Image (spheres, helix red, strand yellow):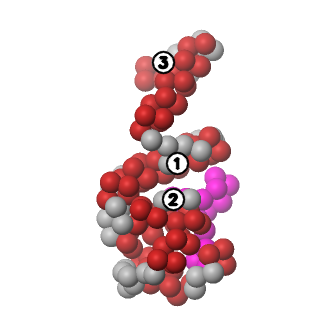
Amino acid sequence: MDVPRTLAEKVDYLIRTVHPRDRKPFTHPEIAAATQLSTGLLSALRSGKNVNPTKETVERLARFFGVPVAYFFDDQTTEQVAAQLGLAAAMRDVGIAHAATRLVGLSEGSLDAVAALTEQLRRLEGLNDPEAGAR
């Protein structure tokens, strides 16, 4: 996955990636209704025609998609959030959406702890190593 760099790429990435398993991505009208932003503004942000949104606009988008406001401005935060959302989307697509969405925003140390716990649970349940072509 390429990390989104521009504001337009970041907005587009969120729209394409953050949605429930049982449906396609949210439409501009759905996002507009939930955020009280116009569909025209959403379209302009997503296409790159508007590269200078207000603080309130960014806060509303961040709240809707469940990401920190820093996702839109800080490259390191963008990379971390995009990696977590990519993982959550992959997990969503195989049917564990709730658990995956709970991982978003956790520190690298916490994610390592979740991975270690998962490995321990697999051992306790007698499951094979997933990297060795498990079950």
Does residue 19 belong to the magenta stretch?
Answer: yes
Dot 2 and dot 1 residues touching (CB under 8 Å) = yes
Q: Nearer the viewer, residue 24 or 15?
A: 15
Q: CA distance from mark 2 to mark 3?
A: 32 Å
Residue underneath mark 2 = 67
Q: CA distance from mark 1 to mark 3?
A: 25 Å
User: Residue flagged by tag 3: what amino acid is it?
Assistant: Asp
Which of the 4 quarters of the picture holds residue 19?
bottom right
Dot 1 and dot 3 residues touching (CB under 8 Å) = no
User: Residue 83, image x and y in percent?
Assistant: 41, 48
Question: What residue is at 55 percent from the left and 25 percent from the top?
Answer: 118
Can residue 78 be seen in this snapshot? yes
In the picture shown, does residue 52 fall above or below 96? below
Does residue 31 belong to the magenta stretch?
Answer: yes
Q: Residues within 10 Å of mark 3 (few under 14, many from 20)?
A: few
In the picture shown, does residue 30 fall above or below 20? below
* Quadrant for the C terminus in the image: top right
Lower position in the chain sequence, tag 2 or tag 1: 2
The magenta-colored residue range is 16-32
Can residue 92 be seen in this snapshot? no
User: Which element carries disc 1, helix, strand or loop?
Assistant: loop
Residue underneath mark 3 = 129
In the picture shown, does residue 58 fall above or below 92? below
Residue underneath mark 1 = 104
Question: What residue is at 45 percent from the left and 41 percent from the top?
Answer: 107
User: Residue flagged by tag 1: what amino acid is it?
Assistant: Val
